[in-house]
Image (tube, rainbow, N blue to C red):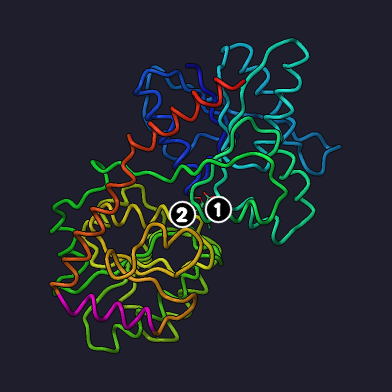
Amino acid sequence: MNIGIVLYPTYGGSGVVATELGKGLAQRGHNVHFVSYARPMRLDEFHERISFHEVSFSAYPLFEYPPYDLALASHLVDIIKFHKLDLLHVHYAIPHATSAYLAKQILGETGQHIPVITTLHGTDITIVGSDPSYAPVVTFSINKSDGVTAVSEYLRNETCNRFDIENEIEVIPNFIDLERFKRSEKSHFKKALCPNGEKVLVHVSNFREVKRVSDTVELFDKVLKSGIEAHLLLVGDGPDRQKVENRCRELGICEHVRFLGKQEKIEDILSIADLFLIPSGSETFGLAALEAMSCSVPVISSNIGGLPELNIHGETGYLCDLGDTDAMGDYAISILSDDELQQKLSRNARKRAEVFEQSLVIDHYESYYRKVMKRM
Ligand code: GMT
């Protein structure tokens, strides 16, 4: 098949899922055309069946806001026609599903029909929560898609509750490359960061408010106060970075907290982790937690969104009420002070990650593509 994938190229789960899916499809013999305004972060290698189309648009003085959605629709018309795409898979309703609908209508005028599949990753729903003016466009774009997928049961239910959805939504979860994300020998790295064998807690995010990075610092402070020698590695960057560092200074724990910034080889860092923290205020799936679990790292998360579909309380880690850093701290202390418990949770975490193995989920996408194409 010739497949178009429209995605956001930035440091974030939806871009990672879309890129890894496209790479996996290319390995299976499909021709994949990625479309975005910049090269996607994980699209870092050459493959003869992968192309990237950059959507460029001019900043005319007349436009205070350059119309990216229209530029994208025009590019899509051209790409679909010239490369004879069989299917367009867009990640995010805003504006991708809307631009895809426009492109489809334009092509329909010439008798060319292309199925459009929209994958919801979640922030579309959150944005509408805080800005209802998008609701009609999101509802329309979801209903006009030929197929719709969501990354968790939670997101499917949330979408149906918030919008007037006529389409069926198929749940296809995030997935993981178990070969890449596995615990590997990194003792030199561990020794450099923790010369006295300190425990390692890790958090990875884009430091947006919704990630509640400060909660990781609060619960880590509790861990330190219990007498456990430990380091907290904070990976990623974003708007809350300074606030979090200020809190570490107030608590006087800076020598135990390392801000590593954005990192490509997350699996190396996860390989020396004893515990992963994801106290988010909203998380439709929690790809960062899945990456940690695949590297045999137990997870302490908030009990919200799609996280309970991934992290099993008492088996792969623990789920706590949102913002309950006291309980999170207590669970962290119990894991870090009991090797047997830590090892049991680690083994279970890896086993749980195997459910989301990449090729199984790509199979699911491929069969969904066929199902949608058949009913066209
Ligand atoms: O979490 C983020 O800030 C990034 C966001 C994105 O838009 O890329 O991730 C969302 O999609 C991921 C892939 O499906 C999910 O694993 C994340 O849970 C989801 N983030 C939120 O719901 C906040």
The amino acid beneath tag 2 is Phe
Q: Residue at x 34, y 64 (%)?
A: 312
Principal SS element in the magenta part? helix
Q: Residue 285 carries which label?
A: 2
Position of residue 348 measured from the top left corner of the image (x, y, whole percent): 22, 59
Residues at discs 2 and 1 in contact (Cβ within 8 Å)? yes
Circle nearer the viewer, 2 or 1: 1
Q: How many marks?
A: 2
Q: Position of residue 228 (x, y in %)?
A: 22, 83
**Quadrant occupied by the C terminus:** top right
Specify the segment rendered in magenta: 327-338
The residue positioned 59% from the left and 22% from the top of the image is 375
Asked if the beta carbon under badge 1 is closer than 8 A to the nearest atom of ligand 1, the reply is yes
Badge 2: residue crowd in 10 Å (few <14, some 14–19, many ≥20) = many
Which residue is at 48% across, 51% downward? Answer: 152
Image: 288 above or below 176: below
Q: Which of 3 and 188 is in front in this view?
A: 3
Q: Position of residue 205 (x, y in %)?
A: 44, 59
Q: Does the residue labelled 2 lie within 8 Å of ligand 1?
A: yes
Give the quadrant of residue 342. Answer: bottom left
Res 93 → quadrant = top right
- Secondary structure under badge 1? helix
Numbered disc 2: secondary structure: loop
Q: Earlier in the sequence, mark 2 or mark 1?
A: 1
Q: Label 1 is placed on what type of residue?
A: Leu
Magenta run includes residue 293: no
Using the image, determine if residue 136 lies above or below residue 225: above
Q: How far apart are marks 2 and 1 (CA)?
A: 8 Å
**80 or 45: which is nearer to us?**
80
Residue to which mark 1 is pinned: 155
Q: Residue 224 carries which label?
A: none
The residue under the point 49% across, 23% down is 370
